[in-house]
Amino acid sequence: MRLNRTNRHPSSPPYLTYHPLATALTTQYPCLCSAGALTPGASQLGVSLYLWEATCVAGKFFYGTSKTALINTEDAVIVTQEATATIAGLTPGVKYFVQFRPDAADPSEGARSGIYHGRPTA
């Protein structure tokens, strides 16, 4: 099978491409995120992220020990376009990766932040 320049089979629908903008194009409204910060604490990480769009009102922080396996979630508290959470019960010294994703009912569904990382302290 030969793939074209966007890494998809010619008969595949456009939303199945592996193009970096594919996620942004499937959302109703953009949810741009910036200034992400992880604050290490005793067996926990404090997470904060600025949301550029006021339309993003509900979401979760997905986290795990691998960028490709963010299998745990923590609800985000969103106040004045800032999403925050405290992820507790983590193993000290282990590197954790965190990403924000709006909830399914949110107008920005499908958008995702960058992936941030940090290590909780003992």
Image (spheres, grey):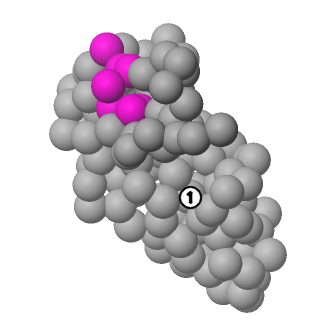
Q: Helix, strand or loop at disc 1?
A: strand
Give the quadrant of residue 19. Answer: top left
Estimate the x, y position of residue 118 in percent, counting from the top left: 56, 76
Residue at the front extreme, as displayed? 2
Q: Is residue 25 magenta?
A: yes
Estimate the x, y position of residue 57 in percent, counting from the top left: 37, 24
The C terminus lies in which quarter of the figure?
bottom right
Look at 41% across and 32% down and name the residue there: 23
| Residue 46 appears in the picture as rendered | yes
* Residue nearest the observer in this picture, 86 or 55: 55
* Location of residue 56 with respect to 20 vertically, above or below: above
Look at 67% across and 78% down and name the residue there: 95
* Location of residue 79 with respect to 12 vertically, above or below: below
Estimate the x, y position of residue 110 in percent, counting from the top left: 46, 27
Neighbour tally class for label 1: few under 14, some 14-19, many 20 plus, Cα within 10 Å:
many
* Location of residue 40 with respect to 6 vertically, above or below: below
* Location of residue 59 with respect to 11 vertically, above or below: below
Residue topped by disc 1: 98
58 vs 75, left or right, is left
The N terminus lies in which quarter of the figure?
top right
| Residue 103 appears in the picture as rendered | no
Look at 56% across and 58% down and name the residue there: 98
Q: Is residue 3 magenta?
A: no
Estimate the x, y position of residue 108 in percent, counting from the top left: 36, 22
9 vs 21, left or right, is right
60 vs 21, left or right, is right
Specify start and end residues of the magenta stretch as a single range: 22-28
Give, as a three-letter code, the residue at label 1: Val
Look at 19% across and 39% down and name the residue there: 52
